[in-house]
Amino acid sequence: METAPEVATPFVTSRFEGWRLHEFEEIGSTNTRAGSLPAWSAIRADIQTGGRGRTVDRKWVSDRGGLWLSAVLPCPGARAKWEILPVAAGWAIIGALREAGMPDLRLRWPNDIMLGHRKLAGLLVERYRNDTAVVGVGLNVSNHPEFEDPALEGKTACLVDLMPEPCTVESTTRLVLRALRRMHGLLLDDGFRSISDDLNHAWGQPRRVEVTLTGRAHHFEGLFQGIDQQGRLRLATPREGSRTYDASQVALLRELE
Ligand code: BTN
């Protein structure tokens, strides 16, 4: 993947629990900027002018007050070992938010963090280099994405409305970076089995979903059956039986119940 040049200058660089955090007022996309940085670097911006969502055509609204953060994680060894990273990152952040007092959150495959049917956060994991992965986190803290895109009205949730304690972009940055570091240690210790077991347990019974595959115009219905050991979606349809898809193959997964 090529790294497009970014021209902004960081307004502050600091260290936090092994991370080197560069913060900007405004940037195109924190993921793009993080792509060329070494492991354990992180980029945060108050505003993104070119924030990207998981599908190519999806612009990510990144207004002031939200957390727009990209963390660079080392990925030693075989590429396949890290395929679960997108799911594991969502799992880790949801776990940290639960510990901070938010019990009602859930994960929508692969890594949307949801409160009921409202989206609190989305993640975009990209591999710019063989030895690292960029975990991009977009999390609504005190921002109002629906002001910028009225189509988001009623579809998003914000952390300040949910947390029992006051929270800020700064405190949420620390929570996310700490969660990602802990999750990384678990994956290094081959903990993906416990992550996938935990997630499959949390997802419970198969649920009806509508899936649009990347690059296809039509969608089809199936039964979401959880994830396999690489974090791939397990989907059953009457025509195809049970199949698996990785996150790059699925443009949209809509829950029907
Ligand atoms: C999605 O749900 O479609 C994923 C959204 C990911 C948005 C974050 S914000 C920080 C990072 N930089 C980007 O350009 N995108 C991710």
Image: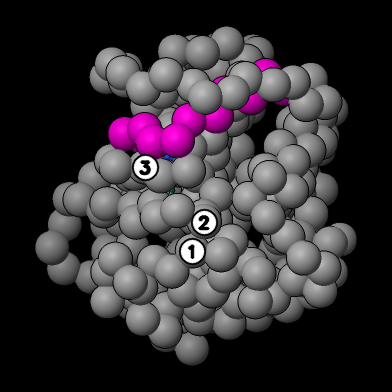
Q: Residue furthest left?
A: 217
Q: Residue 102 appears in which quarter of the rendering? A: bottom right
* Residue 31 visible within the image: yes
Q: Amino acid at mark 3?
A: Gln
Instruction: Say whether disc 3 or disc 1 marks the residue closer to the N-terminus.
Output: 3
Rounded to the nearest angstrom, the CA distance separating label 1 from label 2 is 4 Å
Crowding near the residue tagged with mark 2, few <14, some 14–19, many ≥20 C-alpha atoms within 10 Å: some
Q: Is residue 25 magenta?
A: yes
Q: Residue 147 appears in which quarter of the rendering? A: bottom left
Dominant SS of magenta comes to strand
Q: Position of residue 81 (x, y in %)?
A: 63, 27
* Residue numbers of the magenta segment: 19-29
Residue at the disc numbered 3: 48
Crowding near the residue tagged with mark 3, few <14, some 14–19, many ≥20 C-alpha atoms within 10 Å: many
Rounded to the nearest angstrom, the CA distance separating label 3 from label 1 is 13 Å
Q: In front here: 57 or 177? A: 177
Q: Amino acid at mark 2?
A: Gly
Residue at the disc numbered 2: 65
Q: In front here: 169 or 256? A: 169
- The residue under the point 63% across, 50% down is 169
Q: Are marks 1 and 2 in contact (CB under 8 Å)?
A: yes
